[in-house]
Image (cartoon, grey):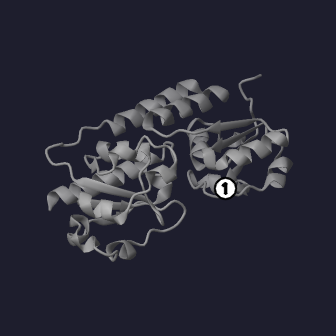
Amino acid sequence: MGADFPSRIVCLSAEAVEVLYLLGCGDRIAGVTGFAAEPPEARKKPRVSGFSSVDYEKIDALEPELVITFSDVQAAAAQELIRRGHTVLATNQRSIGEIFETILLISRIVHRESEALLLIERMRGEIKEIVPSSKRPRVYFEEWDEPMISGICWVSELIEAAGGEDIFAEFRERKSARERVVTSKEVIERQPDIIIASWCGKKADLNAIRDRPGWSAIPAVRYGHVYEIDSAYILQPGPGVLKGLRQMREIVMQTRAV
């Protein structure tokens, strides 16, 4: 296999698209998920899927040499693609460390390991940037609203990197979303100073969050610290999470300033 193999790659996850572009392999991408937004030129690629919905015939027509999927949600898609004769790389990163490992894995497949190591070094440097720790506001991160789901591992780690304290940090090792369901009562009891909503695939309704019964007693609601971070900047486990981290740091700094 030459350095240009695989030369036709279909990505069913947005972070794989961004990784390949950052490794200098954007020209090898034959098709992308509808959630692919970065870099902007990725939006011109043929759209072949949502997150759980896949246009198999369109993928077949693209004749990819590799299809990259993400998470257990796309397990059935990976299975069907294999049945159709495609080579599939199924990633399932859940932590910052696993994000780095996945970037390295993809880089080795496309023969861009040195570029990946530089990318990881840059990401690691920004994540480890020194943040004052004298006052760490308590943060509730909401990944979904019905039911309420707290942040996955990499989100919890980014909250800490931003200078906050995840109020449900003990849940972050729970890989499936249904294992991270929390109740309104639990959130009220833990009294977060900041609420950050990032509902996967839809805009967060901050007014609805503020108006939940009993939530007026939560400091974050009482003092106006309820925010949204676009899910594309925090819930796609790749280089793009740095955008979410930067927003979190700004939010934490604003809260400390009060």
- Please report the residue visible at 22 percent of the width from the left and 59 percent of the height from the top: 254
Left or right of residue 118: residue 189: left
Query: Which image quadrant for residue 223?
Result: bottom left
Question: Is residue 199 shown to the viewer in this render?
Answer: yes
- The amino acid at mark 1 is Ser
Residue at x 80% of width, y 49% of height: 59
| Pointer 1 local density, CA inside 10 Å: few below 14, some 14–19, many at least 20 | few
Q: Quadrant of residue 104?
A: top right
Asked if 176 appears above or below 208 in the picture, the reply is above
Q: In this rendering, would 120 be left or right of 258?
A: right
Q: Position of residue 242 (x, y in %)?
A: 41, 46
Query: For numbered disc 1, what is the local secondary structure?
Result: loop
For this orientation, the residue located farthest to the top is: 1
Left or right, 114 with respect to 44, comes to left
Disc 1: which residue: 52
- The location of residue 238, given as percent across then percent down, is 51, 42
Identity of the residue drawn at 59% across and 29% down: 105
Residue 204 lies, in percent from the top left, at 44, 68
Instruction: Depth check: give the residue in front, 21 or 186.
Output: 186
Quarter of the image containing the C terminus? bottom left
Q: Nearer the viewer, residue 143 or 5?
A: 143
Q: Looking at the rendering, in which quadrant would you find the N terminus?
A: top right
Q: Position of residue 73 (x, y in %)?
A: 63, 50
Q: Residue at x 45, y 38 (%)?
A: 95
